[in-house]
């Protein structure tokens, strides 16, 4: 793709906490792998606490929730690189979902890769390596009307 200086992306309207936002990517991919759901369409990511919702047919067990937390912390400790790739819409790999893109998304997209674990289009802020995230801690979960919510903190 072109020199990064020539790339025009949409303006980003959020001021995210990079460790929590990068952890969101790991969490989404873990949920996809464990439960076969898509990426969350509803997330609120902040420094003090973050919450994400997924539609699921049943509530995950306490053991599954513990496994989610364990998986995220294992990925953090693996010190995976977080890299960016700029592509035009006709160059997007088939495994990259675009259902969260706004209608007015730019022609050029930034793909965020976390090692070989996750890739998605994103204009948010991220850490350079997963070891910079800190400890991932699920503070609570809930399940109402087919929606599973995880609330987490980065310690």
Image (tube, rainbow, N blue to C red):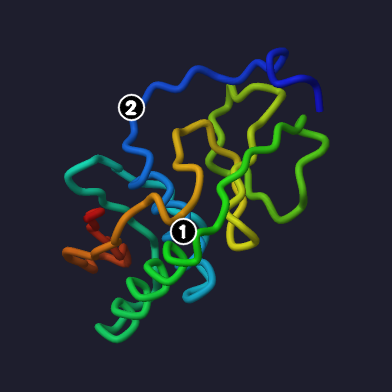
* Tag of residue 48: none
Mark 1 residue element: helix
Instruction: Point out residue 140 in the picture as x, y percentages from the top left corner.
Output: 17, 65
* Mark found first going from the N terminus, 1 or 2: 2
Mark 2 residue element: loop
Q: Residues within 10 Å of mark 2 (few under 14, many from 20)?
A: few
Instruction: Point out residue 59 in the picture as x, y percentages from the top left corner.
Output: 30, 77
- What's the residue at 29%, 79% (across, down)? 66
Cα separation, mark 1 vs mark 2, equals: 19 Å
Q: Which residue is mark 1?
A: 26
**Relative to residue 99, is residue 68 depicted above or below?**
below
Q: Is residue 80 left or right of residue 106?
A: left
Instruction: Point out residue 19 in the picture as x, y percentages from the top left corner.
Output: 36, 46
Q: Is residue 76 left or right of residue 121?
A: left
In the figure, residue 122 lies in which quadrant?
top right
Q: Residues within 10 Å of mark 1 (few under 14, many from 20)?
A: many
State the residue in front, 137 or 33.
137
**Relative to residue 115, is residue 141 depicted above or below?**
below
């Amino acid at each position: 793709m072109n020199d990064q200086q020539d790339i025009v992306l949409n303006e980003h309207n959020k001021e995210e906490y990079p460790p929590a936002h990068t952890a969101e990517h790991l969490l989404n991919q873990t949920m996809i792998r464990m439960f076969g759901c898509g990426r969350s369409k509803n997330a609120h990511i902040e420094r003090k606490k973050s919450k994400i919702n997924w539609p699921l047919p049943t509530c995950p067990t306490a053991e599954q929730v513990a496994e989610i937390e364990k998986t995220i912390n294992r990925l953090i400790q693996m010190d995976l690189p977080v890299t960016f790739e700029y592509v035009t819409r006709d160059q997007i790999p088939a495994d990259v979902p675009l259902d969260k893109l706004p209608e007015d998304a730019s022609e050029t997209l930034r793909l965020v890769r976390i090692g070989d674990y996750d890739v998605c289009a994103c204009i948010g802020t991220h850490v350079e390596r997963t070891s910079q995230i800190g400890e991932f801690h699920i503070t609570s979960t809930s399940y109402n009307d087919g929606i599973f919510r995880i609330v987490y903190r980065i310690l």
